[in-house]
Image (cartoon, rainbow, N blue to C red):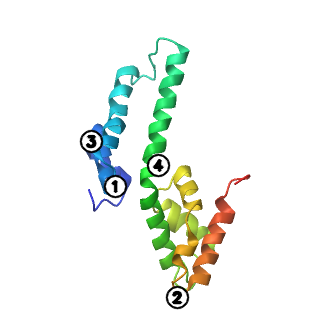
Amino acid sequence: MLSATSPFTFSEVQERSIFKLLRLAGCDQQHIGPFAKLVDERNDIAHANGNIFFSDQSAAVRKIAGVLEQVDAIQDHMQPVIHDCLRRFLKEGWNPEEREYDDPADQIREALLHANYFSQKDIEACLSFDIDSLNGEEHFGEIKELFEGFVKTYRQDGD
């Protein structure tokens, strides 16, 4: 699994077990158990035909809130991995002469976001990256410029 080149590789893994991979991101079993339980709960309340079984609206609202809380926890645990992807991208992609795409926006979209299958939440996590942590890099000015282009493009209004 560590040599996977696509998230689709994981389709061979039992759905409930996929959360064990979060150990690679530093998750403890105390966190992984509730994440895996999401699959069990989904199986208990949802049918493949799209019907979702709840006793009332408030039960559905509570369940949705609980699922969103678990998704936020997973995202929090993944932030160091996401920041590492961004760090590598910036350090390897600062030079326009060596990039795959001439336009920095294309490079960011294709070589960072699409290549890493980043979600909107992953993009939001990247916006909090401490660019000054790369201050010691030889080409920090160019690295920072590439990062600032990313921030300018993907920062949501009001951030």
- The three-letter code of the residue at mark 1 reads Gly
Residue beneath the point at 55% across and 80% down: 135
Q: Which residue is mark 4?
A: 75
The location of residue 125, given as percent across then percent down, is: 54, 56
Q: Which residue is mark 1?
A: 26
Secondary structure beneath label 3: helix
Dividing the image into 4 quarters, which one contains the C terminus? Answer: bottom right
* Residues at discs 2 and 1 in contact (Cβ within 8 Å): no
CA gap between label 3 and label 1 equals 16 Å
Quadrant in which residue 153 is drawn:
bottom right
Q: Which residue is mark 3?
A: 17
- The three-letter code of the residue at mark 3 reads Ser
What numbered label is drawn on residue 138?
A: 2
CA gap between label 3 and label 4 equals 18 Å
Sequence-first disc among 4 and 1: 1
CA gap between label 4 and label 2 equals 31 Å
Secondary structure beneath label 1: loop
Sequence-first disc among 2 and 1: 1
Residue beneath the point at 54% across and 23% down: 61
Q: Is residue 137 visible?
A: yes
The location of residue 10, given as percent across then percent down, is: 31, 49
